[in-house]
Image: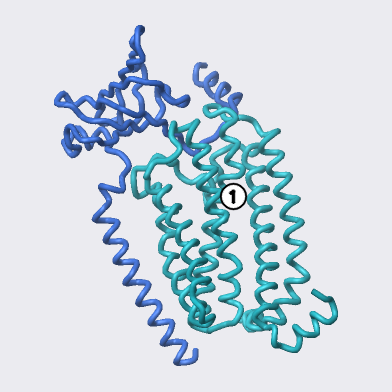
Amino acid sequence: MNWTWFHKLGSPKWFYQWASNWGGRCVYLGLALMAIGIIWGLMFAPADYQQGNSFRIIYIHVPVAVLAQSCYLGMGIAGFVALVWQMKLAPVFIKAVAPVGAVMAFIALLSGAIWGKPTWGTWWVWDARLTSVLVLFLLYMGVIAIQNALDDPIFADKAVAVVSLVGVINLPIIKYSVEWWNTLHQPATFKLTEKPSMPMEMWLPLLFSALGLYLFAAGVAMWRMQNEVLLRERKANWVKKEVLNHGV
Amino acid sequence: MHPVRKKRVITISVILVVLSAAIGLVMYALSQNINLFYSPSQIAAGEAPLNVTIRAGGMVVDGSVKRDSASLDVAFMVTDYKHSVLIEYTGILPDLFREGQGIVAQGKLDERGVLIASEVLAKHDEEYMPPEVTDALEKAKAE
């Protein structure tokens, strides 16, 4: 197998230039896809036979909730890479993505509560799915707090990598909570292996808004990582040149 | 792989496996508390305590909903297709409440085995459909 891409990732300079090309593209393409998905979903997709229009919050709730978990999975992998290979970019990734994931988890909880009030009859219940997503949000908060609380940057990176890695255990709990236990929350909407549980004209807008949000978040993460790379490599010659050429 | 890195991988893996096992065992031990509600079969088997606030969940039995014409009192049966529980409730039901719908009721079991509910929540499944599709399905069923 060809591992050059993996070794290239070890070079902050290479990443910075690569992200300069792709960050903006991801953000704008993602925004466009999201706009299509959300306008289509909120205005043109048919209403649900039981929930009527309140089901439309799915076009925000599901993409955001899935992304909140994906971000943490990414941070877990980066934590593992940071601890084993001590690659420079891995802690940068964790630091850049944690706030993005935290915002996603928060919007997932908020939109779920807003959806729950009219359909279930309550803003919140302590069922396994809701509680495990709240734990995910608190894990994000923990990662951000640890990163900022420790003064020694090398030690902070290591501590954050450990928390990211260990917190991954929560992800299968979130995923299977609706199957292992009796919950108020219904089972998963997005199934990778089975056919979708809704007709195409409802499912396609959901796919658009989910893909759009993923691209948007990827682009934002690249931008945030670029900033962090510049800060951490500020003594390197290529950063000085970059600053002299483009100004800051 | 470099021996130092190999050692790190092994250490991390061992820690993760042990932690997962510990969390798994805790979850297993707490499973009765993590379950949001008792099913009618569990209540019939006497697993649910009397006169303590619990939740019961299941499908509302078709034709079992009886509303009092003078007050907000309502009584209905909830089933998991093996056993049923009678639930009595006073108050406004959620919009999604209807016969054949999954619900979760919070309340206390009395000596008769009736759940006197203080809160009724509606469950819904992950199937979403436009109303025209359900109309067509019902028409097809009727023919």
As displayed, is residue A45 above or below residue B2?
A: above
Q: Quadrant of residue B140?
A: top right
Task: Work out which residue is located at the far top of the displayed protein and give it.
Answer: B70
Q: Which residue is mark 1?
A: A63
Residue placed at 50% from the left, 47% from the top? A109
Q: Position of residue A228 (x, y in %)?
A: 65, 74
Left or right placement of residue A141 versus residue A30 in this view: left
Q: Is residue A218 above or below residue B63?
A: below
Give the x, y percent position of residue A185: 43, 41
The colour with which the image depicts chain B is: blue
Chain A display color: cyan
The amino acid pointed to by label 1 is Pro
Q: Is residue B70 left or right of residue A70?
A: left
- A198 or A124, which is in the foreground? A124
Q: Quadrant of residue B18?
A: bottom left
Q: Residue at x 31, y 32 (%)?
A: B106
Nearer-the-camera pick, A218 or A229? A229
Task: Rate crowding at label 1 as few (under 14), some (14 to 19) or many (20 or more) other CA atoms within 10 Å.
Answer: many
Residue B75 in the image, given as x and y percentages of width and height = 30, 18
Q: Which chain letter goes with mark 1?
A: A
Residue drawn 17% across the image and 37% down it: B49
Q: Nearer the viewer, residue A145 or B68?
A: A145
Give the residue at x 59% y 60%.
Answer: A100
Q: Where residue B1 sits: x, y (%)?
A: 49, 89
* Label 1 element class: helix
